[in-house]
Image: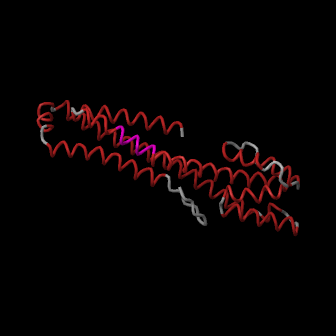
Amino acid sequence: MKNANLIAIFVSLVLGIIAYFTSNNYYLAGSVPVIFLFYYLVIGSRKIKQYLSTNFRIHSCYHFINSFLINMSVKDSLDDSYFNATQGASGEYLDIVNELNNMPTMDKIEYLRKYFNLAVYKMFINVLNIYLDQGGRLLSMGEALLQETTRIEDTLNKSNRSIKKIAIEFGVLWLITFGVLVFLRFGVQEFYLTMLTSIPFFVTLCLFFVLFILSVHIFIIRATNIYIKGDRLDV
């Protein structure tokens, strides 16, 4: 999240510089970065924060289920399995784990359903309850569950890699677009300065920066949309 904030600040500064050089207008140069930062603080940062939180929650759920089932099949101990499964917890997840310290282990596992809030975790609790009631080979009983958690983890990792690739392409395309605009400003300076005296051209230039902010919004909305079969994730 800290990196996203730094990128947003950097982009706003660059927008201000480009807006000034392409318009010779202090008002536009000042308003464009302010509008962009306002959008980021009010909408963009919240969507990104929710997306990162959901990503972390899914990864943590995957680690918990896999670690718990493997440890439980070896040691047959709820306490040891829970302890090993929650090692490495951080942030909000760690706070919740610490709050549950005085609860019975099975109650802790049941309570984490509220945090993970994923269909696969509910399947995990069902499998665990059946094992505790009827016995059997836990890994065999949970084989389909482990396959599902692996599928979810792989899908999420592929999605994250795809988003990074698209983000780079998105940034490069807009960088080229702004580069063309700056080139026109200095490459055909006399003609460009003449166009700046035209109100329709200045309005078009303003709309150009609005289009950029709008495109950033659309990109963030689509990039932070996480879909997992069986779950409704509001990001």
Q: How many marks?
A: 0
Figure colour scheme: secondary structure
Q: Nearer the viewer, residue 127 or 52?
A: 52
Q: Which span is picked out in magenta? A: 33-41
Which of the two residues, 43 or 209, is positioned nearer the viewer here?
43
SS majority, magenta = helix
Q: In this view, does 85 lie to the left or right of 52?
A: right
In magenta segment, residue 40: yes
Q: Locate residue 121, reporting x and y percent.
A: 70, 60
Residue at 41% across, 33% down: 10
Residue 64, position as x, y percentages in the image: 73, 52
Q: Is residue 132 above or below residue 210?
A: below
Q: Where is residue 144 in the image (x, y as percent from the top left)?
A: 72, 64
- For this view, does 51 lie left or right of residue 112? left
Identity of the residue drawn at 42% across and 51% down: 219
Nearer to us in this view, 231 or 62? 231
- Indicate whether 82 appears above or below 168: below
Q: Assess whether residue 64 is covered by the magenta stretch.
A: no
Give the quadrant of the N terminus. top right
Where is residue 202? Give x, y as percent: 19, 42
Res. 77 image quadrant = bottom right
Q: Which residue is drawn at 41% across and 45% down?
A: 39
Quadrant assignment, res 180: top left
